[in-house]
Image (tube, rainbow, N blue to C red):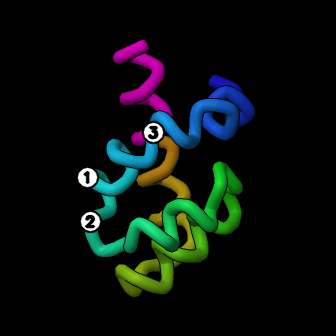
Amino acid sequence: MNWNIIKGNWKQLTGTVQSKWGELTDDEIDQVAGDRERLTGLIQERYGIAKDKAERQIDAFVAEYKSAA
């Protein structure tokens, strides 16, 4: 799935993002505004994980979204 679809639906997905990464604040999620790199950085920072692990989590999130759509 193309990340542009996620980016285009970001406002509708903020609740799902919040439930997946509960340590991110609503303001942070709003500031991400669908920017994958920004989301990756926030997940790395908040959860203290490497970039590749954060990217794998985002890939899993995209796969879940795709299967639900």
* Residue type at numbered disc 1: Ser
Considering only order in the chain, which callout, 2 or 3, is on the residue closer to the N terminus? Answer: 3
Q: Position of residue 65 (x, y in %)?
A: 42, 27
Looking at numbered disc 2 in the image, what kind of residue is underneath it? Gly
Residue at x 67% of width, y 27% of height = 5
Give the main secondary structure of the magenta stretch.
helix
> Is the C-beta separation of discs 2 and 1 under 8 Å?
yes
| Residue at the image point whose x is 37% and y is 29% from the top | 64
Going by the numbered disc 3, the residue's amino acid type is Leu
- Left/right placement of residue 14 relative to residue 51 reads left
**Residue behind mark 3:** 13
The quadrant of the image that shows the C terminus is top left
Cα separation between marks 2 and 1 = 5 Å
Q: Who's the residue at 40% across and 86% down the image?
A: 48
Q: Secondary structure at mark 1?
A: helix
| Residue 22: assigned label | 2
Who's the residue at 29% across and 53% down the image? 20
Q: Which mark is residue 19?
A: 1
Nearer to me, 37 or 22? 22
Q: Are there few (<14), some (14-19), or many (20+) residues within 10 Å of tag 3?
A: some
Which segment did they paint magenta? 61-69
